[in-house]
Each structure stands twice: as structure tokens, then as C-alpha cells.
Amino acid sequence: MRLLLSPSLIALSLGVTLLIATPTSAQGAGTSRPKNLCKCIPDDKTCWPSEAAWEEFNDKKGVNGKNGVHGRLIATTPVASVCHGMPGVPRDEAKCKEVEAGYGFDKWRSNQPGAVMSANWETFMGEGCLLKQTTPCEQGAVPLYTVNATSVDDVVATVKFASKNNLPFVVKNTGHDYLGRSMGIYSLSLWTHFMKKISHNDMFIPDGAPANTKAEAAMILEPGVVWEEAYNYANQHNRLVVGGNHPTVGAAGGFCQSGGHGPLSPLHGLCVDNVLQYKVVIANGTVLDANAYQNQDLFWALRGGGPSYGVVVEAVYRTHPPASFQVALLNITATDEAMMLKVSEAYYAHQTRLSAAKWAGYALTRKDHLFMVYHLPNGNEATARNDFAPFKQELEAIGATIDKERYLPMPSYKAFLDFWASISSGRNVGLNLLLGSRLIPSTMLSSREGSKQLATTMFGILKATQPNTKEYLSMLVTGGQVAKANAAETSVHPGWRTAGLFNVIYGGWADSTPVDQQKDFATRLTTAVDELRKITPGAGTYMNEADANEPDFKDAFFGPNYQRLLEIKNKYDPQSLFYCRKCVGSDEWDALSVCRM
Ligand SMILES: Cc1cc2nc3c(=O)[nH]c(=O)nc-3n(C[C@H](O)[C@H](O)[C@H](O)COP(=O)(O)OP(=O)(O)OC[C@H]3O[C@@H](n4cnc5c(N)ncnc54)[C@H](O)[C@@H]3O)c2cc1C
Ligand SMILES: *[C@@H]1O[C@H](CO)[C@@H](O)[C@H](O)[C@H]1NC(C)=O
Ligand SMILES: *[C@@H]1O[C@H](CO)[C@@H](O)[C@H](O)[C@H]1NC(C)=O
Ligand SMILES: *[C@@H]1O[C@H](CO)[C@@H](O)[C@H](O)[C@H]1NC(C)=O
């Protein structure tokens, strides 16, 4: 194994105070590392497993029973290393062609142990191996080893091996995470992507429930199932399940543990509001059932408290009866900035009414237009036109142009999702990306003053973050059942229950962008979104779609639930095997040198 701490990485670690998409840290990796506080790294031969120990764990011959992973261990390298060459990885034209062809596509990336969707997370402190980079290739944050798990036994063996050897450890499913929580420097990665069994039970009763418990229709998913697969399965059984609108996001991994919103949320709640049971492998290798009757604390934490309590090896979700959807599609164009601000204000000011009328949807705002795709469960065209009329009247008064106005009936959720797939693209990944976001309190949207203030603030953010950003997304995935659900049952930020909208801005940079420019954008983004934080005190945000450098992440991601979540984390994972960036308890760690501070 080659030495991972290159001199330039150490130099960087000493000079940089704000890291791009990496933890802030005062302690360099080159300084002495107190053994009892640090995870083992490859440089430390006294603790890092020997080649023989790795081989025994890999257990190609299958002689170690449940202690081995019968040949499923992969020495992992960055995907683009075959294009540039790297110590231990020769350049390979043919393989590089494959990498180039797949690089921007989510399905290809999710099949690579060494790739995630936002490529910046494959790098660490400016070093890594991106396709278009001009500096030499480094391992970056790409795990050193990956277990391509296909069974609960694989998961248990891997968790035990990582625990026993005190290794930096990550769980990777699809790699969609925007905070880089599925990558980790020097790590052993547990890859759940190929655990794909799905089944259903029309009369599900949680394990350990009292005899008179009401049975519910449910879907039972292994952690590698993605939403497209879950939806197809649900559709075959004529049921609905609350998930996201992107086909390749995992259905039972990080999505739901942090909240999980989607087109059905106003109708049926967040993903966390629909979990009936989890099966979890905790840090000591024990498999636990977590539901309303057993390990209730863990069950609560896994419904909104983010990743980091254990590995979910099975999730059981409530399903719902089928529905039809009426889609309304509008593209609203303004001739100048003043007009666009009025369009944006009008958009915000009409949300309370649309939400009360049971609409949900997504809107993209750029400096000259706002494109919205909204949908009404079980609605029809007449209702849709009627509900949009007051908004359109205001837009006409402003002088904005409404273009592409369409009202489309979708007979089923499947039809609705196919329509979504037709207007989105799988080729938008492999980029370097950071986000900024906030849950928007419904009280802000119910006043004209608030709507105007919000529009002005959002435009300020867009301007301050250019040229890296060009648009932001507003999602009406709140209200309705999200607001009605019993907040105490889940650990998502309570801001979800009082939000009227969720806003996310995003931007990126090219692979060849110098580190100081990346840093500059990261700072401008975090600082610009402060204006939104200031006018929405306590509102919080959704940690799955948030700034990786969120200043007060405990409050923003977890709010008043943080302390209890930390107690649960410490109970089930006292060694912090499941450390992840901006997760509960993560502030006790210096992720650069992988030590507890
Ligand atoms: C294109 C795109 C569209 C999106 N759309 C939506 C949307 O509509 N709604 C929404 O709510 N979010 C959406 N997201 C955000 C999404 O919820 C997060 O990216 C989420 O982290 C993805 O989870 P994953 O398991 O697929 O990804 P991964 O990156 O593999 O994992 C995410 C986190 O969960 C942990 N994890 C994964 N599997 C397990 C497991 N079995 N047990 C324990 N921990 C695990 C990982 O360690 C990591 O910390 C979207 C993201 C992208 C990139
Ligand atoms: C992981 O395992 C699955 C299932 O056995 C297999 O199809 C896939 O090719 C493996 N991937 C890698 C990179 O080994
Ligand atoms: C909406 O209109 C703008 C401005 O005319 C245009 O650039 C954009 O492509 C349109 N969007 C869609 C989805 O039609
Ligand atoms: C594993 O951890 C759980 C939770 O802390 C504990 O109840 C259990 O006894 C532990 N099991 C073993 C084998 O250490």
C-alpha cells in the first residue's frame, strides 16, 4: 500500500482554515496521533491490518465462516485513475473510454465502488482524481477497500472487522449524498448497493407488537433498493409508497434516515412518517429490530436523525392506495430584474393557497424566469385551472409572459413519474457541487411582506454566488400530511412540520478550478445563505440537501432533537464507528486526522 499522506496534503492541512467540502480542523494529520483517540490509518503499522489479515477477512476460499466476506472485498481506486494513471494503477485507454462514457451518468456512477454523484466528495482537501483535473492523481477520499455486500452476514462481518481494527468506516449505498457522507479518507466502505430484495406484506405487524395491533399494508426493502425499483414493485401491486422523484436515489439508505421528501409528501407525509420497522446492524455486530415496540429510541433516531447509528439492512414502509395526478406546468418569463422580483414574490405569496388546495410540486427560479411543475393528487383540469387563475392574473398584471402552460392528466403515480423522467436527465452528476438550503416557514409565505422579503433575499443569494450558481429550487413538499404528522414520533427537524416550502440553491466548479477559487465559492455560498438564515430564525433545513459547511449544523439539521440523538448515538455506537460529516456527534471528531478531539 502506498503512503497516503502526500507532502502537499500535509502542507494544505496546516495552511487552510476553511476547507472546501472537508472538515475544518486545526490538527494536521502529520502531527502525533494519540492512539486511544484516533482511528487506525494505513501509516500506522502497529494497528493497520496486515495483508494477511485483509486476505483472511476477504476469505476467497470461504473457510472463515461468518468472519469473512467470501471474496467480496475490493481494493478501491478513483474511477478516473485509469485515465491519468496513479501509483499502482496504470493508464488504460480502453478502460478510460468506459469511464468517460459513464462519468456523467447516475446509473454508471452508482455501480462504481469508488464513485459518488458529486465528484468533489471523491477528493480530500483539494486532492483526488477527477476526470478533467490537471494535477497528479491521488486517492483522495475514495475508500481503500470496499465490501460489495449481498447479505446481512456480509454486513455483520464487515462491521465487526471495522470495529475490531478501529478502522475509518463508511456505508455507501448509491452515493447520492450531497455532504459526502458516503466517502471517507483511509476508509473501509460497506457497499449496500447490491442488496436488492423487495417483498410486501398486506398485513404487516411490527415484531414484538401487542396482539391487538392493527395490521397495515407494507413494503419490505433491502438497503440497496433504489426508488425506481421500489416504485415499479409498488405499481405492480397497485400501491403507492412515499419516496423521492429521482429514480436512482436509494429507497432504504440515507434518504429516509434523514427525512425523505417527495411528490407524495403533502398527501402522505415524509418517508420517516411511513416507516413501520427497521432491521439494523449496530456497531458491535448485533442485529436489532427497531420499531414502535422494540428499541424505540433507535427507531426514533433512524427516522430523521441522519445516518450514523448503525447499518439499516431492512426497512418496512407503509403503502397507500393508488391515486391519479393532475399536473400543471408553467414557464413564467420576466423582461427585467424588477419584474422577476415581482414574479418571485407572487410565486411565494400564492403558495399558502395552493398548499391548502392540496397542491405539491417543484419550481426552478433563474434570473429571468420561473419554471414550475406542480401536481394535484386526484385532481382534474378544471380545478387546476381554477386554482392557478389568481396567480396567473397577478402575473399578467405584472406584465410577465406565461409560456408553456400545460395541464396534463396522469392516470397513475407511475405515469406521473414517467412524465418526470421525460423532463429530467440522468446525466447531471459527476460534477463538483455544493448546496445551500432552508426550510421556509409557512408564516413567512402567508404574508405579502414575508413573500417579498424572501424573493429579495433569494435574488441576493443568487447574485452573491454567481457565476457558480445559476438557479435555485423551491419544493412544495411540505404542508398537508407533513404538517399534520405527529412530530414527536420522528426526529426530523421540527421546522419540517411548520414549513411552507423548502428552498435549495446549488452551484459548482470545474475539475481544474484551483483550490483557492473553490474555497472562495464555498465561502460565498455559506455567507450568502446567512441572509436567509437570519430572516428564518430556528427554521432549520433538510440535512440531505444542505450546505456541507452549514455553520451551526446541530441547530440547522437537528434543532431541539440534537441532545437526545447524541445520547442514542453514544448508546448504540460509543466508539463512533459510524462517524460521518455533520452527523450527530461528528463535532467531537477531527476528520482530517480521524481522531476524537
Ligand atoms: C439527483 C438527486 C435527487 C434527489 N432527490 C431527492 C428527493 O426527491 N427527496 C429527498 O428527500 N432527497 C433527495 N435527494 C437527496 C438524497 O436523499 C440524499 O442524497 C441521500 O443521502 C441519498 O441516500 P443514498 O442511500 O441513496 O445515498 P448514499 O450517498 O449512498 O448514502 C447517504 C448516507 O446514508 C448512509 N447510508 C446509506 N445506506 C445506509 C444504510 N443501509 N444504513 C445506514 N446508513 C446508510 C451513508 O453512509 C451516507 O451517510 C436527492 C439527491 C440527488 C443526488
Ligand atoms: C458487486 O456484486 C454484484 C452482485 O454480486 C455484482 O453484480 C457486481 O458486479 C459487483 N461489483 C463489483 C464492482 O465487484
Ligand atoms: C422557460 O423560459 C426561459 C426563458 O424564455 C427559457 O430559457 C427556458 O428554457 C424555459 N424553460 C422551459 C423548461 O421551457
Ligand atoms: C451490543 O450493543 C448493545 C447496545 O448497546 C448491547 O445491548 C448488547 O449487549 C451488545 N452486544 C454485545 C455482544 O456486546
Image (tube, rainbow, N blue to C red):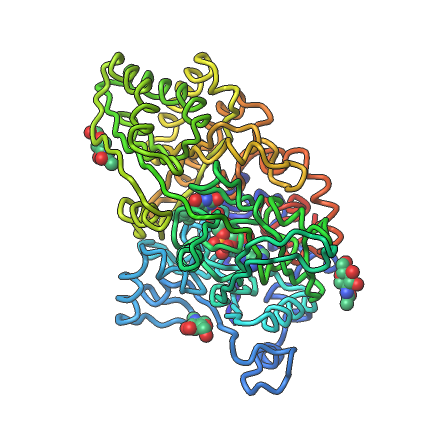
Does 3 sit above or below residue 258?
Answer: below
Does 535 sit above or below residue 307?
Answer: above
- Tell me, yes or no, if residue 282 can be seen here: yes
> Looking at the image, which residue sits at the far front?
212
> Which quadrant of the figure has residue 108?
bottom left
Q: Position of residue 392 (x, y in %)?
A: 28, 20
Residue at left offset 71%, top offset 66%: 286
Q: Position of residue 311 (x, y in %)?
A: 61, 60
Report the front residue among 379 and 510: 379
> Which quadrant of the figure has residue 290?
bottom right
- Tell me, yes or no, if residue 88 can be seen here: no
Report the front residue among 177 and 300: 300
Residue at left offset 76%, top offset 53%: 571
Does 526 sit above or below residue 319?
Answer: above
Q: How many marks?
A: 0
Q: Position of residue 401 (x, y in %)?
A: 21, 22
Q: Position of residue 5 (x, y in %)?
A: 53, 59
Residue at left offset 47%, top offset 20%: 445
> Which quadrant of the figure has residue 207?
bottom right
